Image (cartoon, rainbow, N blue to C red):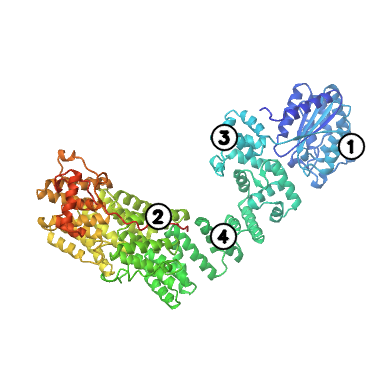
Amino acid sequence: MTLVERDRPMDLLERLQCESASGRGQVVLINGGLASGKTALLDAFTDRVAASGALVLNATGSRAERTLQMGVLDQLLRSPALPPAVAGDVARMVTVSAPVAEDDTDSVTIRQSHVTRVHGICSVLLDLARDRPLIIAVDDLQFVDSVSLQVLLFLQRRIRAARVMLVFSEWDHRAATPMRSRAELTRRPHYLIKLPMLSREGVERLAAQHPAVTADSVGAERLHRWSGGNPLLVRALLQDASAGGHEFRDAPGPEEESASAPGSAFRRAVLDCLHRWDPLLLEVAQALTVLGDYSSPYMVRWLIGVRQDTAAQIIDVLQDAGLLDGHLYRHQAARAAVLNSLKPVDRTALHLRAASLLHEHGIAASEVAHHLIAADSGQGQWAADTLREAAAEALSLNRPQFAVQCLTLALGTCVDDASRTAVREALMRIEWRANPSAAARHLAPLHEALNAGRLHCGEAALLARHLLWQGSQDAEKVTAEILGRADTTSDSETAAELRLTQEWIHGSPRRPQRNASPVADLTLGRKSAKVNGNVWAQAGATLAAALDARSSSRVAHQAEQILRSCRLGDHTLEAIACALSALIYAGRADLAAPWCDSLRQQAQECGATTWQAVLTALRADAHLRQGNLAEAGAQARTALDLMPMQSWGVVAGLPLSIALLSDIAVGRQTSLPDRAVPPAMFETVFGMRYLHARGHHHLAHGRILAAVNDFQRCGDLMQQHGMDLPIMAPWRSGLAQAHLRMNQTQTAREFVEEELRRPGADNPRVRGHALRLLAEASQVKLRSSLLRKAVDALQESGDRLELSRALDELSQVHHEQGQYRRARVVARQAAQEARTLQAPKVPQQLTREDEAEPVISVSESVLSDAERRVATLAALGHTNREISRRLFITVSTVEQHLTRVYRKLNVSGRADLPAGLTLHREHAVGSAGPQNPQAC
């Protein structure tokens, strides 16, 4: 391979060789950093001069043979280039002797026993130079043994008029070659060739010589930046590029290293550089890998116990070698290679010393914690306190995984039960964010701490919350105990938080009466709804009002006020979930949806998988209430995929019930009922919803008795818990559907009528669904009126799935009554709703002529709002008197509106009104959704 950027040194060597060949002896010292190409230059030069007829004797110093006397001289004089007769003579003069002490290697005095042999060897060499030019090349002069060095110095003093050229190479470091020997060498006339590292252009030229890559494909700038111009490292990078298909292209940004990281050749080359010199070089390099950003000669001194000036000299060597940029490695791959060269026990010890050193110098707790974690050990209370502080800092920066690492190590470092309990509580809280089943391992020790009186009220409340989530048998007892303690200590926030968790999971049996004032239970103002107020009690009251179907606008306002005031965190998840559920139950899923999306994003940024899963399930619930089946099912399954089933605990019923209902509606085969769920789930609100959904699953597959069993069990549980509210799980409607399948219309009608009398039945979605079933169970002459009322309610609710079903059934009733034109109009409206939802096509009684009839869009007409409302109701089959009662206007006004509608739409009567006249509920602009979202 051709040398790069070494033309001038080579020209100088060849010129000096010419002068020495003419009888003017020369001494050349080639100096350079680690792996700078000194050996390559020396080899290339000796090959050239040997080809020209000169006699070349080569030798290489070695650290391993530095104390082996005459070792280098033996290499020189055993060269096959020597004439056989001369080789035999000098071989008798050279006797490799036993090693001497390291301290004696710097001697420049020729011992008496060696004088004769040294003189004889030099005489033989000078005689050889009379016949042809003699080149003596010694690589790595710093490792030459003392006797061989004495002979070379002796020869140097006698070549002034000889055809001899001495060429030595050494490292560019003042401590490399023994000081007295080097001083003797350089005291006499000589030439010094200093080899720098390659420039960017030199790296590009070197890359161009590589057979498998091009400079453009590897990126010369990056090669130079990563290697510092060190030829050995550049060639290693090129080898990696060739072997592994790497493309080291130039690209700004911190991600560039991971995008095209060097391979094994580069790592080996880094270690080769470090193993070429004194072992102290590797020790300092390893210290720098551990210290990282806090590297300096001062810190290295205290970490490994070397002199500060020695550490500074070695750092200079590493910088000159292209390994370091300042005190940091140029590439993480180089740092990793050096770090991995440490034995595990040595690495642990080094990280522990680094942690102690940084702690003593007041470095940030997170930096100290990194070393303790790397060592997987810590000793003393200072280590435990540092790890806890680092965990708190990590949480504030949304780094929960590092926080868990810190606290897990701190748990084994604590020196007393009190601090150990505090660490375990914090660890459970953080682990629960990502995986509740993993956090469950802390429940038993914390329960023991509770019994021993080591848990404060807030910590005990966290324990109770997790026991409730997991459905533990001890949950009720522990909760009651903690609530009693909170009431005694006047810790109202802790008590309210725990009660809300209990109500969110198990429901509240103490529901207000239907005739209670909708404002009476929602009296907390904006000030008291802040997080430092009793937001949990407010959330519970808001959810209760929504379940009782009271004042949806007031409920929506209060729920959004809570969402604006709450910051998503460990203590507010249940309050936020209750506020979102209140919006959904109040028929304002359109408001709940953007809140869910915003909060899910926050949860994802925090790395809180549990929060994200719950919020995703609530987002699915919003889709379900709006009749968006595909999205509801997709979101519910996403929620289930975020965590294993055991992590969901008793809350698993929430996403499972939503996924089941959506699968049933779209006719999708599902195995969700086969999933194992905790038995305790059936004693919760989510278990009741799951039973209701599973009942519909059985019903859809023709298992009517199994469906009746699930619906009845759902109802029994809801009544036992004082939660018999159809807005949550309309189990009576489910029983009515089952009895209709069995042609027991009277029983079905009784169940529906009972449901319509229950608290919360005023909810438009509940009422619309029940009225649709009641129509199916009633006489034909009553069905039209009941279905129109169902359509009215479902239009207000925003549930397009149920609306499409009600419209389809109303169309069928019109068809049976001979009102074919009206049937076609309503059927087209049902089809439009079904197409909007991308649901299975609703059966329609349409002829080919009807299908081709154009649909007039209301948005393209010139109807006023009042005219559109009247026309919509008329198209659905309402009489003028019914329209007047519904819109609170006179019959005469209705007639006037219809007259103008017929004229504007160019139709002859209400039977010809277009299918586009569908009045969807227009929500009042009372909220802009989530504003100023707060981070975790």
Please provide percent x and percent y for residue 346.
64, 53
Amino acid type of disc 4? Answer: Ala
Q: Is residue 277 left or right of residue 342?
A: right
* Dot placed on the residue nearer the N-terminal end, 1 or 3: 1
The image shows residue 632, relative to residue 137, as above or below, that is: below
Residue 146 visible? The answer is: yes
Residue, disc 1: 115
Q: Nearer the viewer, residue 191 or 508?
A: 508
Amino acid type of disc 3? Answer: Ala
* Dot placed on the residue nearer the N-terminal end, 3 or 4: 3
Q: Which mark is residue 241?
A: 3
Residue, disc 2: 643
Real-space CA distance between mark 3 and mark 4, rounded to the nearest whole angstrom: 40 Å
Residue mark closest to the camera, 4 vs 2? 4
For label 1, the crowd category at 10 Å Cα-Cα, with few meaning under 14, some 14 to 19 and many 20 or more, is few
Please provide percent x and percent y for residue 246.
54, 36
Residue mark closest to the camera, 1 vs 3? 3
Q: Nearer the viewer, residue 709 or 247?
A: 247
Residue, disc 4: 390
Q: Secondary structure at mark 3?
A: helix
